[in-house]
Amino acid sequence: MGSKRSDRREFLKRGVALAGGVTLGAVAKSASGQLEGPEAFIQGTDELVGYGKRSSYVTSVRIPHGGRASPDTFGLDFHIAAPLQDSVGVITPSSLHYMGTTRGSFVPDIDPEKHRLMIHGMVDNPLVFTMEELKRLPSVTRMHFIECAGNRANRRHRTVQETHGMTSCAEWTGVLLSTLLKEAGVQDGGDWIVAEGVENVVGASSIHMAKAMDDCIVCYGMNGEAVRPQQGFPLRLLVPGFEGILNVKWLRRIKVVDQFYMTYNDYGHLRQDSDDAALGMQIGPKSVITYPSGGQQLPGRGFYEVSGLAWSGGGAVARVEVTTDGGRSWVDAEIRGTAHPMAHTRFTFNWEWDGQECELQSRCTDVLGSVQPSRVQAIEYWTQRGQPARVKGQDNSIQPWRVESDGSVHNAIS
Amino acid sequence: MGSKRSDRREFLKRGVALAGGVTLGAVAKSASGQLEGPEAFIQGTDELVGYGKRSSYVTSVRIPHGGRASPDTFGLDFHIAAPLQDSVGVITPSSLHYMGTTRGSFVPDIDPEKHRLMIHGMVDNPLVFTMEELKRLPSVTRMHFIECAGNRANRRHRTVQETHGMTSCAEWTGVLLSTLLKEAGVQDGGDWIVAEGVENVVGASSIHMAKAMDDCIVCYGMNGEAVRPQQGFPLRLLVPGFEGILNVKWLRRIKVVDQFYMTYNDYGHLRQDSDDAALGMQIGPKSVITYPSGGQQLPGRGFYEVSGLAWSGGGAVARVEVTTDGGRSWVDAEIRGTAHPMAHTRFTFNWEWDGQECELQSRCTDVLGSVQPSRVQAIEYWTQRGQPARVKGQDNSIQPWRVESDGSVHNAIS
């Protein structure tokens, strides 16, 4: 075994043998440097008083995903991934929330005063709402992740941003779609909706009425302020736990229809069977270790808090297990804070690294009892469905990270 | 009575008589305007791909509190208040988190590589941590509010930003202070700590060891990224539920001491008695309606979701009541999402306004059973303590908003 478990009690009992031992040597230096006061100040301009900024020392940014984005593109795949390797807690800052679109890097610049949401199709009372009218209605506030169905790792990826960066989590506020649909009065046979955004190429997604009436949210708020333009300002549809593409940005129309319609947004799915379409949209239980992860460097043997994110479209995360020996033995990680339904959940694991090469993995189980599969299991699943030797559709398989004896961390997908 | 309660079921049953009735007339206009596509786009520059921005149509900003801030000040009181009137959910965006300091608008521009945290004083093993070392230790992630003890309303205030804007709530990530203190080994008699930040005038706060060992957090993470400079980058002490001034920003030293020390940070408190100091620091149960609130305008009679924030230093919010008749009758509001301990909690109340003048108030009860006092009760409390006719210390009294028959909303403090 390349490593062993160290729980918090052990960590504390050993005291100076761990962090204390690491840091005691630095006490002598304490009389100089930062302990004596700052060398520079940031001036409080009117702009910074009004709306603050992050430190110039913090440079974490989103990056193009799988070569599918460049600011110059327009009318093309545009996918940018969140820097999960730098994440703390469960909220993704709105400025770093992943973004996926097939319409390029330009996003609609919408005047909220002019924006309207129409509910139409197979309803008794077609409705059009202004933003102000929507904000007068009963609201909900919930933590939810959104993940692109194309968020999958391969052996060429180096970092967790490349393998898993197409997922993010925010506090969303808005009106339950069911509130609007009940106002409009859904007619018999209105079993599906098509949700459409304001886009230069018309984007639309088909969603089953059972989901639409359950927990979908027409969101105007995100992380305590208005939804950001890249996330759909002024209005985004949240379809908790379902594939990212269904969470229509710049939402302007919801049409109640009698069947699944294959739309431009289904380009990657090509599901012509309505049952298959309805069932294939939910994100499976998934997790990934964000520290230590590919491209990071451990400074040396000793104590580390292994940290990661887990989530599931099936509900709340119930359990996360971690292995440090490539899957031979698994132990429970700690879940930090509240495990909200269909939300990123932070897990941690106290680990003492003995300096030997080892392989870290995490495995998520959700409240339904669904367990995140190994990569071998995922490939077998798809092989049985006529897609040999690769994971098609969603890939929620376990991510392995190899820690070398020099402390470097690498993607261990073979 | 100027108003009556309308619960969600009634709202839905009445259907088009409420929001539907308001909006049906707009359907005819649906063929034009925003439903037909956006007029403008935001270009996806490298900068925006890396780190997104809010819409230029969203202009909500922090403002000086009580005339105590100007970007030109240096070495003076500098307090800027969060725009609670625009808040959604419970998270305050980091860019809009309130800030209070007595050292001007300039904030330290700290290089995290050079920053150190020292634990010293009455400990067996004085410790100095680098940021990297702190991040290797077991962490917690928790939602907590911070509120300035000076967050109090008076009759001259117009908006909820002026009356209550010196409170904010974020998801904080860091190491429990108890983890560090146990590593250092607190000596017998070390009953207090003094926490000190990197500041041009030395800021420090005394905190009792019981609180320090309970739930204080040495935070490096805020809302999913690094703590912002205005909130203490790279390190801030969180003292959940206690007065804002104790939540030391730009934290560099924690000294274990034998008694309460009156420091510069206690300038407004002048507590020389240690028991009084320890007991006076916890924020009482408090709430405020953010919509409708002072300065806002209701477009007309009909359905509204009344919305607000509640919090308490004593634990989670257990109950929020709302009155629409100036306090003669109270009904329970709905708590939205999870009521986390010592965190802002969003409450809502479905209300049909009949167009008559009325007065809205909210009242918070926490898990300890403590109830937010009326303004009269708060003044009585301080009168009995030799401070007649005004609320001294913290003011957690109920905020009244008067809705005029023309839909304008006003601060009703007399």
Image (cartoon, coloured by chain):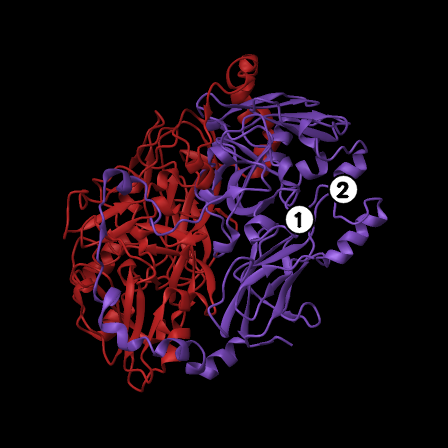
Chain colours: A purple, B red
Residue A37's quadrant in the figure? bottom left
The numbered disc on residue A313 is: 1
Chain for mark 1?
A
Under circle 1, the secondary element is loop
- Give residue B402's position: percent from left, percent from top: 32, 36
Residue A4, given in percent of the width and then of the height, sits at: 59, 77
Three-letter code for the amino acid on which mark 1 is drawn? Gly
- Count the labels in the image: 2
Placement of A391 over or under A129, stated as above or below: below
For residue A168, above or below residue A411: above
Question: Residue B372's x, y, as percent?
Answer: 36, 55
**What residue is drawn where x is 27% and y is 74%?**
A29
Q: Earlier in the sequence, mark 2 or mark 1?
A: 2
On the question of residue A126 being in view, the answer is yes
Residue A87 in sight here:
no
Nearer to the camera, A183 or A56: A56
Up/down of B339 relative to A97, above or below:
below
Residue located farthest toward the front when viewing the structure as drawn: A406
Dot label at residue A146: none
Within 10 Å of disc 2 (Cα), the crowding (few <14, some 14-19, many 20+) is few
Return the residue at label 2: A279
Give the amino acid type for the residue marked by disc 2 in the picture. Leu
Query: Disc 2 versus disc 1: distance between alpha carbons?
Result: 12 Å
Q: Chain of mark 2?
A: A
What residue is rendered at 55% in x and 17% in y? Answer: B36
Q: Residues within 10 Å of mark 1 (few under 14, many from 20)?
A: many
Q: Nearer the viewer, residue B297 or B244?
A: B244
Q: Residue furthest bottom?
A: B188
The residue depicted at 60 percent of the width and 30 percent of the height is A102
Q: Considering the image in quadrants, where does the N terminus of chain B appear? A: top left
Residue found at x 61% / y 34%: A177
